[in-house]
Image: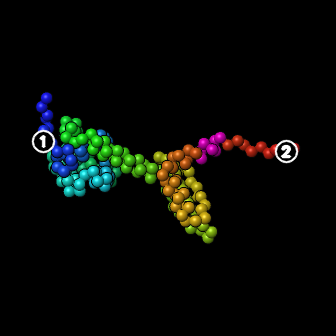
Amino acid sequence: MASYFPDINYELNDLHSVKVLLCHLLNSLNKEVSLDELYEIAVGSEIINYFYYNEAIEDLLKTGAIEKKVKNGKEVILITAKGSYGAEELKRCVPKSLRDKIISVALKLFAKQKISNEVDCDIEQTENGFYVDCKIHDVHEDILQMKLYSPTYEQAVFIKEKLESNPSEFYGKIISYALNLKEFQPNVE
């Protein structure tokens, strides 16, 4: 059986492979992606070379495989039907391991962004130590606001990092504890 792509180099050192990989990413995500996010995913992760990335974006825009739009005051990149078709038809040009890797990087970036949008933590110095002031947000409301005392700055930073790493889990544990808490009944004898 003859190969349809006999001369394809599977390293990302050619413009064609980079364009296919970027289209595959955008097609797989099926969402708007800002230029900064796309750059962070592709170049920040060192999957794609800076120069190939810039040239690929320029070519994809020129050929109409991707397009720029402004949504909610933010410039985003969208894949077009042409780009989507190309991504599906030519994905064999890029190894599955690279396709999976770039999608994994993208999903991790978006998860990190979602978590950072859920929580605001600041460290405030007091006379005797530090407060970690924390607000956990839901879609339209602050669902938790609290200050936690810490005697040292290092401990305050640790608390802040733990809260920011998984605010949903922290909130869930507090609510779980509060709902399972039995009313205090003094032992009177």
Report which residue position mark 2 lands on. Answer: 188
Residue sticking out furthest to the front: 1
Which dot marks residue 7?
A: 1
Residue sticking out furthest to the right: 189
Q: Amino acid at mark 2?
A: Val
Q: Residues within 10 Å of mark 2 (few under 14, many from 20)?
A: few
Residue 175 highlighted magenta (yes or no) = yes
* The C terminus sits in image quarter: top right
Q: Is residue 26 above or below residue 129?
A: above
Q: Amino acid at mark 1?
A: Asp
Tag 2 or tag 1, which sits nearer the N-term? 1
* The N terminus sits in image quarter: top left
Residue sitting at 30 percent across and 46 percent down? 102
- Residue 110 location (% of width, % of height): 38, 48
Disc 1 from disc 2: Cα separation: 87 Å
What secondary structure is the stretch in magenta mostly built from? helix
Residue sticking out furthest to the bottom: 127
Q: Residues within 10 Å of mark 1 (few under 14, many from 20)?
A: few
Q: What is the quadrant of residue 97 in the picture?
A: top left
Residue 76 highlighted magenta (yes or no) = no
Q: Nearer the viewer, residue 164 or 15?
A: 15
Q: Element type at marker 1?
A: loop
- Residue 35 location (% of width, % of height): 28, 53
Part of the protein shown in magenta = 174-180
Residue sitting at 22 percent across and 53 percent down? 53
